[in-house]
Image (cartoon, rainbow, N blue to C red):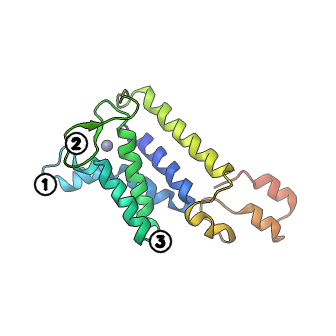
Amino acid sequence: MIWQNHILIGASLAAVIDPVLVPVGVIGATAPDWMEWVIKPFYPVKHRGATHVVLYWIAAIIFFLAVDWHRVGLGFAIGGFSHVFADAFTIAGVPFAPWSDTRFHLFGGKLRTGNGGEYVVAGLIAALCFCFVLYSPVKIGTAADKENGFIPFFYNWKKFYDEGLIDGAEWKKNRFNFF
Ligand SMILES: [Zn+2]
């Protein structure tokens, strides 16, 4: 899958947890590929090999859920997981566990990298995440903690209105201004 779509999927998933995590989610979403370049001088890593093991990224998510109170690591791990998850839609697939030679595929692994299909998959995932962020009554992760504060990327116009900082017209005008 091309980076553009990896970034879109990673950013969307990170936003579901917390919009503040979007930048680290983006770094994580490209990590399985750039980590290959970083490791290569020291260790012969195959493309879509060690850095694309699904189980490693699931373990990273669990680890950061347990220890990382800043959630920066969690955003990164979710981005990384989104990358290998998305690569599982492609013909080449990804390794599920370090000890298995079989490739892991989702939905038959029909996507060819750079083909139109991957835009559809990325767009669908992003749309689902976007709807979730907008309409879900459930708030996951730190999004709930941030309810009473300032959220970078998602200015809290509603709260400004409630506090009388801006008037109704201004709120109406800006309520769909997320950036
Ligand atoms: Zn990759």
> Please, is residue 29 above or below residue 71 in the view?
above
Q: Residues within 10 Å of mark 3 (few under 14, many from 20)?
A: few
Residue name at image x 63 percent, y 68 percent: 146
Q: Residue under label 1, please give it.
A: 43
Q: Quadrant of the C terminus?
A: bottom right
Q: Residue under label 3, please give it.
A: 70
Looking at numbered disc 3 in the image, what kind of residue is underneath it? His
The local secondary structure at tag 1 comes to loop
Looking at numbered disc 1 in the image, what kind of residue is underneath it? Tyr
The local secondary structure at tag 3 comes to loop
Q: Distance between the residues labelled 3 and 2?
A: 31 Å
Q: Residues within 10 Å of mark 1 (few under 14, many from 20)?
A: few
Q: Residue under label 2, please give it.
A: 47
Left or right relative to 155: residue 90 = left
Q: Quadrant of the N terminus?
A: top left
Residue 134 in percent (x, y) is at 67, 50
Tell which circle, 3 or 2, labels the residue nearer the N-terminal end: 2
Residue 36 in percent (x, y) is at 23, 50
Looking at numbered disc 2 in the image, what kind of residue is underneath it? His
In front of the other: label 3 or label 1?
3
